[in-house]
Image (tube, grey):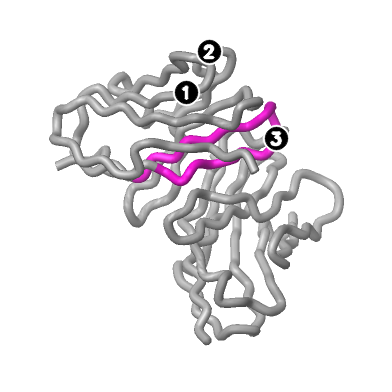
Amino acid sequence: AQSVTQLDSQVPVFEEAPVELRCNYSSSVSVYLFWYVQYPNQGLQLLLKYLSGSTLVKGINGFEAEFNKSQTSFHLRKPSVHISDTAEYFCAVSEGRGAQKLVFGQGTRLTINP
Amino acid sequence: EPEVTQTPSHQVTQMGQEVILRCVPISNHLYFYWYRQILGQKVEFLVSFYNNEISEKSEIFDDQFSVERPDGSNFTLKIRSTKLEDSAMYFCASSRDWGNTIYFGEGSWLTVV
């Protein structure tokens, strides 16, 4: 069975600092990986996804993530964060082609301090 | 930009009562989903729906739950007899096709008292 672990429940950083949100997964088959963001009082919005090809994936709002198969990781990074990046970030995985059934991590709350 | 809309945003109900959560998926989407998030826990898959039938459901989705697409635009989740442990944020989602991006609504927060 698949599982996703987000190692940090909360990450506080200062504005304009870099950030990395960690995600590890376990699965016995090929997986597809996603990062979703939830801004306060809003729904889940797709930041980026890895289906195949280049292991470095770029998403919206300057975020990127790198798929590392040997370490079963899909960490999310941004070189310089803004106050507006304050949100909850969810890593998710699906097995096989596509994303009909997503398994989510527990989420990481990113707080940007001025 | 098209979006998934959900109503109500928040509902409080007494234990044992029936609840219907409503969703309007994106208009040209064919796959519909319900997920839920109990406070402090992970977002969990409940059910997927395609071509007017359930295509997959989780073990959480027992007989007290049902889904329906009563017309061409709405997609509903019914909880027949609510329990305290059904208190959660319920997310509706849709995708255009198998393998396409899943778009989520803002969620309906259900509180069972």
- Magenta stretch, residue numbers: B89-107
Q: Secondary structure at mark 2?
A: loop
Q: Residue at x 65, y 84 (%)?
A: A16
Relative depth, front residue between B41 and B30: B30
The local secondary structure at tag 1 comes to loop
Element marked by disc 3: loop
Quick check: do tags 2 and 3 share a chain?
yes
Disc 3 marks a residue whose amino acid type is: Asn
The residue wearing badge 2 is: B52
Q: Give the alpha-carbon distance from disc 2 to disc 1, as whole Å.
A: 12 Å
> The residue under label 1 is which amino acid type?
Asn
Q: Nearer the viewer, mark 2 or mark 1?
A: 1
Circle nearer the N terminus (2, 3):
2
Q: Is residue A106 magenta?
A: no
| Snapshot quadrant of residue B63 | top left
Q: Which residue is found at the position 68% from the left and 69% from the top?
A: A77
Residue B110 appears at what percent x and percent y? 28, 41
Residues at badges 1 and 3 in contact (C-beta under 8 Å)? no
Marks 2,3: beta carbons within 8 A: no
Q: Which one is earlier in the sequence, the residue at label 2 or at label 1?
A: 2
Of the residues under marks 1 and 3, which one precedes in the sequence?
1
The Cα atoms of the two marked residues, 2 and 3, are separated by 19 Å
Residue B7 lies left or right of residue A57; in this view the side is: left
Closer to the camera, B109 or A53?
A: B109
Q: Disc 2 residue type?
A: Asn
Q: What chain does badge 2 belong to?
A: B
- Residue at numbered disc 3: B100
Estimate how packed mark 3 is, as few (under 14), some (14 to 19) or many (20 or more) residues with alpha carbons within 10 Å: some
Res A14 quadrant in image: bottom right
**Disc 2: CA contacts within 10 A as few (<14), some (14-19) or many (>=20):** few
How far across and how far down the image is residue A56, in percent?
80, 60
Judging by the rendered image, the residue that carries numbered circle 1 is: B74
